[in-house]
Amino acid sequence: MERYSRQVLFQPIGREGQEKLGRARVLLVGCGALGSVLAEILVRAGIGRLTLADRDYVDESNLQRQSLYTEADAREGLPKAVAAVRHLREINSAVEIVERIADVNALSVASLVQEQDLILDGTDNFETRYLLNDASLKWNIPWIYGACVGSYGLCLAFLPGLTACLRCVLQQLPPPGSSPTCDTSGVVGPIVHLVAALQAAEALKILTGNLRQVNRKVVTVDVWENRVATLDLSQLNRDGRCPACGQRRFEFLEGAHEGRTQALCGRNAVQIWRSSPRPVDFKPIAERLARLGPVQYNEFLLRAHVDNLEIALFRDGRGIIRGTQNSDEAQRIYAKYIGN
């Protein structure tokens, strides 16, 4: 307990709460801006096991706001989950940390969320958040939503059976292009750390059993315009008409809203995944693409530069085409150089 003595001295946590943290199992989806800060806070707090699920790799443009990573990680082109685990194990070797280099979707989410005590949102898209909401309700696991863009951010905790769910708040997916992104509005580092801190605080309350202290309100902050506000959601879903928590229809778990391509926030890139993932042999692909431009690969990831674009290929066949946000063009590039 000496390592966590200052945390134990905080009476709402105490020794009993610290012991609960040491047994806690947390899934963090997304190791980007919010995720990298969240992971460090929880590892320093001494949680028992942290599972990191992320589909992306470290790029130089990440370093402005994704505080866990270094220039060396970007040069090596490491998957974020791998780079995060390396740094986190140096921070606290007593925490069990598991990396999952994978897209979290309807096919993969069940194996990730089951047996977890809490799900943390470090994602950058609504599709995945609605999926996490379905998983939270089906397996009765709390989850904490976080988002930020520009200088604005928000945080909201969801407790199945005790609070409204995400679909009570937003019944339908927002239309494409209707919400600002870091592509269109940018993002400043302070709001990332502030929202992650709010999420981490709610996580510590939940994991130590202090459910009465969990904030049932949406907290919104704008660090540039000096605004802080809350919105009470306690009156939502009183009639049980919510399709998810009221009617138990888990459309996102069933894959009803998933596609084969997805634009990635802040990356000028499109992700492409196969309906039936299977292992990829990087060596012959690298030899073939080397005739067209620079290629590098490690045990996790292949990166090639062709047609003024970058192709990042993962072991499961999932690809990220950087340099376009056109899904048709991305699919064409993938099919031309990687195959269907």
Image: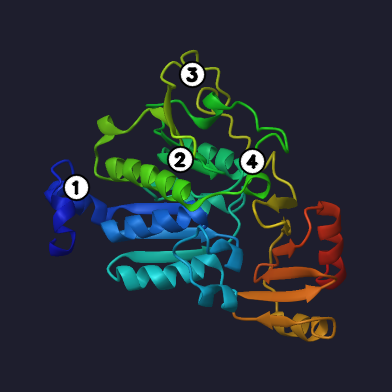
Q: In the rendered image of this protein, does residue 267 appear above or below residue 110?
A: below
Verify CB contact (< 8 Å) between mark 4 and mark 3: no
The numbered dot on residue 223 is 2
For label 1, the residue is 17
Residue at position x 49%, y 60% in the image: 66
Q: Position of residue 328 (x, y in %)?
A: 86, 54
Amino acid carrying label 3: it is Asn
For label 3, the residue is 237
> Tag 2 or tag 3, which sits nearer the N-term?
2
Amino acid carrying label 2: it is Val
Please name which of the two marks, 2 or 1, marks the residue nearer to the observer: 2
Amino acid carrying label 4: it is Glu
Does dot 3 land on a helix, a strand or a loop?
Answer: loop
Q: Position of residue 195 (x, y in %)?
A: 43, 44
Gap in Å between the C-alphas at discs 3 and 2?
31 Å
302 vs 109, left or right, is: right
Verify CB contact (< 8 Å) between mark 3 and mark 1: no
User: Mark 2 packing: few (<14 Cα in 10 Å), some, or many (20+)?
Assistant: some
Which residue occupies the extreme front position in the image?
225
Gap in Å between the C-alphas at discs 1 and 4?
37 Å
Quarter holding the C terminus is bottom right
> Tag 1 or tag 3, which sits nearer the N-term?
1
Q: Position of residue 53 (x, y in %)?
A: 51, 58
